[in-house]
Image (cartoon, rainbow, N blue to C red):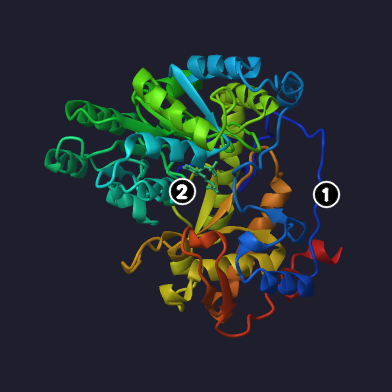
Amino acid sequence: MHEARGVVRIRGVSRLLPPPWKTKVVEPIALRVAAERRIAIGEAGYNTFLLRSEDVFVDLLTDSGTSALSQEQRAAMELGDEAYAGSRSFFRLEQVVRETFGYRYLIPTHQGRGAEHLLALALVRPGTIVPSNLYFTTSREHVELAGGRWVDVAVPEATDPESPFLFKGNIDLERLEEILDAAAPGEVAYVRQEACLNMAGGQPFSMENLAGVRALTREHGVPFILDATRISENALFVKEREPGYEDRSLPELIRVIADHAEGAIFSSKKDHFVPIGGFVAVNDLELARRLREQVVVYEGFPHYGGMAGHDMEALAQGIRESTDERIVQAYVSQAQYLGTLLADAGVPIVVPIGAHAVFVDAKRLLPQLDQTEFPAQTLAAAFYLAGGVRSMERGIVSGQHGSDPYDDLELVRLALPRRVYTQEHLTWVADVVKHVHGRADEIPGLRITYEPEHLRFFQARFAPLEVFPDLAIENAATAPAVLEA
Ligand code: F0G
């Protein structure tokens, strides 16, 4: 298996190299006893989104807004200029965005979906289409709310959890060309390519593919916009995996990727280590004007969007840190490490191991369940019951769309907040997942009891089809010795 440079094997045992930081401030966490976990997941309707964080031990729900700030980010926050208009913090952020990504115009928003909303309002008209590598939930929702249609042009490997293809974030260029050829003038609102494709397992695109998408969109006169939320990890994977890029620096690679597109949206809650923030950045003045017309309606004045001045300072510093190869390498290696522990134990996971998370394949782990019995939702509940680990469903609950039957990826995501957990936390998670894997045949499915109309995964509620067995790792005959100490 392909392994990141931050994971080493010492006498056959995988180890993480120490990260380039140490802990200065800590937040207490606790493992609730098994009976309390049963009550908590029941009250949450078997939806991990609805658990209270105080009931969670290791929280791998998301890598979004959950990273640790650096001392430099906290110091920068003291400089926040909270002026409504003309804030110094905005101009500092604009400068960093220009230097790092090269885009001329910055429109700040409260988070990624704010940027997606503005972009959809500016570019999508009823009846237009947005070809993209797979989908992200909120990205697709905003396009559809604006009357557009999402068209999946991911390579087929993206939805094959067992394919070892190294660039599952690639776009199928032949399919994209067919669509662009067949489209009427103005019918394609824009082409979107997402870096380190979240829903496929945190999988990168290659520079070669990116260049192909740029060539096709230029030839057809269609805007090309990146979802650059996880651009740092994509750049690192290019450096590690794509011939010809091994000697380029991470800042250079990030810049080259950004240069391929006319603009990008970012959820800064991921690579930029901030609890809140995002932006859209573009090169075209006319498009920037249209975005600024919308930002004042939905987010705030263009000099802060949805952020406070101190948020913009933390973000500017976070962007600088997001180009530091040692930092990016350290957190990507955590996913590689956790994934290696699971793969070595025979747990079915998405390969290659992604950047921000390890994805467990619930179809293969719970083969007794039909997809309409929500295997991934079930498995996420089981991980919580077994050891207080919170993860997220990325299967039929998130992916089902309209009335089309869904038979695609059925994954549980163990997402790694950046700079937060230690190797000990990760070995705990691996023990919990392995324990559930060993008890898989006893686990019943779920039925849905409440389903919101939009983005149902966030707030849907479920009930078990049969009583869940006692999955608590500490009650198991084979419980790790550490629990008895
Ligand atoms: N684009 C991608 C690729 C994302 O992963 C997300 C959020 C967004 C856009 C929206 O950004 O949350 O700041 O509004 N992903 C989070 C996750 C929620 O858990 O994967 P947002």
Element under disc 2: helix
The x and y percentages for residue 278 are 55, 33
141 or 175: nearer the viewer: 141
Disc 1: which residue: 28
Q: Residues within 10 Å of mark 1 (few under 14, many from 20)?
A: few
Q: Is residue 247 visible?
A: no
Image height check: is 335 above or below 291?
Answer: below
- From the viewer's perspective, is 426 left or right of 122? right
Residue drawn at x 37%, y 18% as measured from the top left:
285
Disc 2: which residue: 138
Residue 440: quadrant of the picture: bottom right
The x and y percentages for residue 291 are 43, 29
Tell me if the residue at label 2 has its CB under 8 Å from ligand 1: yes
Q: Is residue 221 visible?
A: yes
- From the viewer's perspective, is 350 left or right of 386? left
Determine which of the numbered discs, if any, sits on residue 362 in the image.
Answer: none
Give me the C-alpha separation between circle 1 and circle 2.
32 Å
**What kind of residue is marked 2?**
Thr
430 or 230: nearer the viewer: 230
Residue drawn at x 17%, y 30% as measured from the top left:
220
Dot 1 or dot 2: first in sequence order is 1
